[in-house]
Image (tube, rainbow, N blue to C red):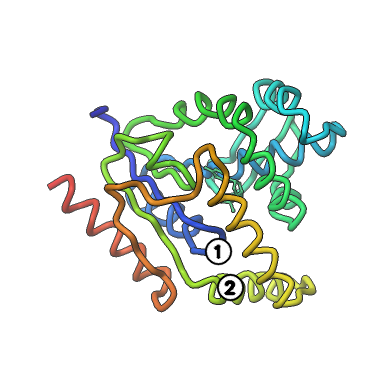
């Protein structure tokens, strides 16, 4: 096992893993890898470049050349080729494109090394779909964070309304189910818990409760 500890937090959209990962990283003083942001950036970049997502080699070539920079705040600022794209990648279009490029094996391969580069001392919290299964199979702790699909749709609805963005709950639920299906059924790196992952259901838990569970599990691992 590498001397640089990794906590892998995987799970479906809306499970709270992004918020939990950022908080755990901040409490431990660890680096944060928001791998979904990489897929979101690739999707948006392909869209801007008018690349047909059926052209897998072109999408993969684009993935290799992207100039991506994350702000020190982790989930905060994201720059693509020097331009701020933080808000754009979080739109529904960004979510949809990310899920589609995520299903392209050559694109996943192109982003693989880039993700390994985030593993630096004193440690890394990595959030995504395949952190514990594919990218960091030797992670010290693997969490699979879930919540019921209706709870996840409610959370997304509240987030959008709080931001002053109109949203229709049944549409969000339908889109979430479609992304879950695409992410879980793809042949390469599907969304599924690693055999040695701890499965946490956040449906009835607060963010703080989940964060504390993860920190306690990590403390127990490292003795
Ligand atoms: O975590 P997120 O919601 O930002 O991820 C957006 C999409 O990116 C998700 O629907 C699937 C894809 N993704 C992936 O395929 N592998 C990852 N490790 C992270 C995200």
Pointer 2 local density, CA inside 10 Å: few below 14, some 14–19, many at least 20: some
In the image, residue 213 sits, relative to residue 133, either above or below, namely below
Q: Return the mark for residue 155.
A: 2
Residue drawn at (70%, 21%), measured in percent from left and top? 61
Left or right of 151, for residue 145: left
Q: Tell me what residue is drawn at x 62 percent, y 40 percent.
A: 102
Q: In this view, does 55 lie above or below 14?
A: above
> Is label 1's Cβ within 8 Å of ligand 1?
yes
Can you give x and y, in whole percent of width and height, for residue 144 in the image? Answer: 38, 55
**Residue denoted by label 1:** 14
Query: Disc 2 on helix, strand or loop?
Result: helix
- Picture quadrant of residue 179: bottom right
What's the CA distance linking mark 1 and mark 2? 7 Å
Report whether 82 appears left or right of 22: right
In the figure, 120 relative to 145: above or below? above
Whether residues under marks 1 and 2 lie with C-beta atoms below 8 angstroms apart, the answer is yes
Closer to us: 42 or 219: 42
The percent coordinates of residue 133 (x first, y second) are 39, 40
Figure disc tally: 2
């Amino acid at each position: 096992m590498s001397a640089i500890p990794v906590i892998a937090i995987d799970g479906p959209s809306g499970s709270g893993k992004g918020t939990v990962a950022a908080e755990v990283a901040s409490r431990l003083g660890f680096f944060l890898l928001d791998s979904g942001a990489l897929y979101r950036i690739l999707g948006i970049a392909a869209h801007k470049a008018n690349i047909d997502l059926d052209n897998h080699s072109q999408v993969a070539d684009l993935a290799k050349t992207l100039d991506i920079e994350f702000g020190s705040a982790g989930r905060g600022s994201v720059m693509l080729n020097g331009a701020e794209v933080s808000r754009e990648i979080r739109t529904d279009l960004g979510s949809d494109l990310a899920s589609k490029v995520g299903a392209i094996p050559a694109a996943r391969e192109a982003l693989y090394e880039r993700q390994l580069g985030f593993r630096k001392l004193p440690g890394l919290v990595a959030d995504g779909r395949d952190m514990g299964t594919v990218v960091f199979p030797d992670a010290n702790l693997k969490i699979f964070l879930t919540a019921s699909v209706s709870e996840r749709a409610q959370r997304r609805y509240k987030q959008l309304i709080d931001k002053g963005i109109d949203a229709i709950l049944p549409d969000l639920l339908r889109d979430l189910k479609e992304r879950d299906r695409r992410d879980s059924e793809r042949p390469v790196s599907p969304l599924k818990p690693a055999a040695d992952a701890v499965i946490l259901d956040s449906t009835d838990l607060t963010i703080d409760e989940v964060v504390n569970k993860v920190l306690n599990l990590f403390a127990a691992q490292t003795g």
